Image (tube, rainbow, N blue to C red):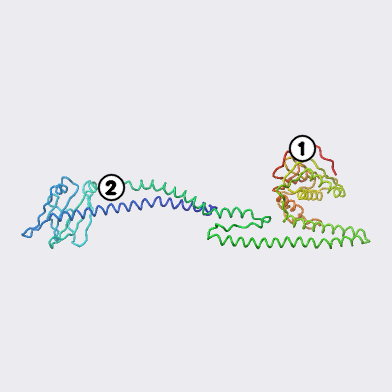
């Protein structure tokens, strides 16, 4: 059963095996029952014939016995007719009457008893089946033997018995297959609540912790499991909410001490020491802001009618990070579509994602290089840099929280790209990184589609900042 992942497929497979077995053994069992019934019918007919023979035997005044068969009965048992035969024996095994020539018994005399004895005799081309039945007549015990040629048994019963297995087999298999089809529909209907609960369970994740498995209509055997899962989800959601609240509260509480610390650093006379301390404080402030941003993303809801222009948002981001780029002797340029490229989503959140991608590119590119923000009319935004690129083995890990290639390097907490991945997930978009032809990396943010038409791609870049 390990090859069948679905409960329905397992039930159907087992049911199909049962149908195959039933299609074979049920007709066989019925055939054996019918054959037994036919043999019992023949044996009863033989006993009735023996009893009928006894009715035609009379006791003479001198104590002898006389057999007077009606003409129709005598003709039936005549040796010329060859279908039936009889013989009457006394307790000593002497033949008193016989339909055979020379007054022969049908079978050799046997030790007398109280039970009827059935026999089958093979002679020539015929198979003879008969009974030796003990009967009482006027205080005497007689043995009446009656036999029938099996080749001349009731033709109707013989034909039914002979063809029963094949006929019933062909009838039974389609009926059982029809039953299988009905059972499949019954199984699917019975498992419909479980299937619906499974589909809902796939949607439960860090961003949808409020979802619960439905208990209405759930089978009694599965209901305790559903309740246990829902209770576990309640505890999990409570823990996640507490964790998010703690992160947000901690970040808020750290903002004030950092502001005070930054003011005190500005009062230090040693400017070299002050600059080093100020860089550390800025790194801590950036981490606090990212933690607050992560906490905000967990509760942020995008309006159903919100939209954002990727071209306009990219230009705003380029203007915002321009001072940072200039301070590092680098440039930022916006290229691609000149006209609006509208996608469904929140402009502020999309701007944060683009800003994090650009800041990440600026942090890993050499002095004098340029970071390009390419806006594709198809709803794809690319951030292209001249840095060292991202190794293939690290391309999935860089979007995880707190992941850093070099943990000894200060100034980064590993949250920027995870924020980008979360914003992309909120918008139904995807984010991936590829190698840039020549050298560098290309981070592509692909949205599901654009709203309206976009202008053709402008081959010339916008002025760099």
Mark 2, Cα crowd under 10 Å, few <14 / some 14-19 / many 20+, is some
Location of residue 146 in the rendering, given as x and y in whole percent from the top left corner: 19, 53
Residue depicted at x 77% and y 42%: 375
User: Which structural element holds mark 1?
Assistant: strand
The residue furthest right is: 269
Q: Position of residue 446 (x, y in %)?
A: 72, 45
Helix, strand or loop at label 2? It is helix
In the image shown, does 239 or 110 lie closer to the viewer?
A: 239
Q: Residues within 10 Å of mark 1 (few under 14, many from 20)?
A: some
Foreground residue among 461 and 112 = 461
* Residue sticking out furthest to the left: 62
Whether residue 130 sits left or right of residue 432 in the image: it is left
Q: CA distance from mark 2 to mark 1?
A: 90 Å
> Which quarter of the rendered picture does the C terminus lie within?
top right
> Nearer the viewer's eye, disc 2 or disc 1?
1
Residue linked to disc 2: 158
Q: Residue at x 59, y 62 (%)?
A: 228
Residue 196 pos. (x, y %): 58, 53
Residue shown at 81% from the left, 37% from the top: 460
Q: Nearer the viewer, residue 387 or 326?
A: 326
Question: Is 233 placed left or right of 343 in the picture?
Answer: left
Q: Quadrant of residue 463?
A: top right
Which residue is denoted by mark 1 in the rendering? 457
Place of residue 272 in the rendered image (x, y in percent of width and height, measured from the top left): 91, 58
Q: Compare residues 168 and 3 and report the one nearer the observer.
A: 168
Dot 2 or dot 1, earlier in sequence: 2
């Amino acid at each position: 059963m390990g090859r069948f992942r679905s409960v329905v497929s397992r039930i159907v497979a087992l049911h199909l095996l049962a149908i195959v077995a039933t299609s074979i053994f049920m007709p066989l069992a019925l055939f054996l029952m019918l054959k037994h019934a036919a043999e019992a019918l023949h044996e009863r007919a033989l006993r009735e014939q023996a009893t009928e023979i006894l009715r035609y035997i009379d006791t003479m005044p001198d104590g002898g016995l006389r057999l007077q068969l009606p003409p129709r009965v005598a003709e039936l048992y005549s040796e010329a007719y060859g279908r039936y035969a009889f013989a009457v024996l006394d307790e000593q095994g002497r033949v008193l009457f016989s339909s055979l020539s020379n007054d022969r018994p049908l079978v050799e005399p046997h030790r007398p008893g109280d039970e009827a004895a059935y026999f089958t005799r093979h002679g020539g081309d015929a198979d003879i089946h008969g009974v030796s039945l003990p009967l009482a007549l006027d205080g005497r015990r007689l043995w009446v033997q009656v036999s029938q040629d099996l080749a001349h048994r009731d033709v109707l019963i013989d034909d039914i018995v002979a063809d029963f297995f094949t006929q019933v087999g062909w009838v039974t298999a389609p009926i059982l297959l029809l039953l299988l089809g009905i059972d499949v529909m019954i199984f699917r209907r019975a498992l419909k609540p479980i299937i619906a609960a499974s589909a809902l369970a796939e949607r439960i994740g860090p961003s949808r912790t409020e979802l619960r498995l439905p208990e209405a209509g759930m089978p009694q055997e599965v209901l305790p499991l559903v309740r246990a899962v829902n209770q576990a989800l309640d505890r999990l959601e409570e823990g996640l909410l507490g964790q998010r609240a703690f992160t947000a509260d901690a970040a808020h509480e750290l903002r004030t001490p950092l502001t005070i610390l930054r003011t005190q650093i500005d009062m230090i006379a040693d400017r070299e020491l002050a600059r080093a301390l100020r860089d550390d404080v800025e790194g801590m402030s950036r981490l606090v802001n990212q933690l607050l941003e992560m906490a905000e993303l967990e509760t942020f809801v995008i309006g159903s009618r919100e939209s954002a222009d990727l071209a306009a948002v990219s230009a705003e981001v380029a203007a915002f990070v321009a001072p940072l780029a200039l301070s590092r002797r680098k440039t930022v340029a916006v290229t691609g579509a000149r006209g609006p490229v509208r996608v469904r989503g929140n402009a502020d959140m999309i701007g944060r994602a683009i800003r994090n991608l650009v800041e990440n590119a600026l942090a890993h590119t050499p002095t004098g290089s340029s970071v390009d923000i390419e806006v594709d009319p198809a709803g794809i935004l690319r951030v292209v840099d001249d840095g060292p690129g991202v190794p293939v083995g690290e391309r999935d890990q860089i979007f995880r929280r707190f992941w850093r290639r070099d943990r000894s390097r200060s100034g980064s907490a590993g949250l920027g790209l995870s924020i980008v991945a979360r914003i992309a997930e909120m918008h139904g978009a995807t984010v991936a990184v590829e190698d840039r032809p020549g050298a560098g990396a290309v981070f592509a943010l692909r949205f599901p589609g654009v709203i309206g038409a976009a202008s053709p791609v402008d081959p010339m870049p916008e002025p760099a900042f």
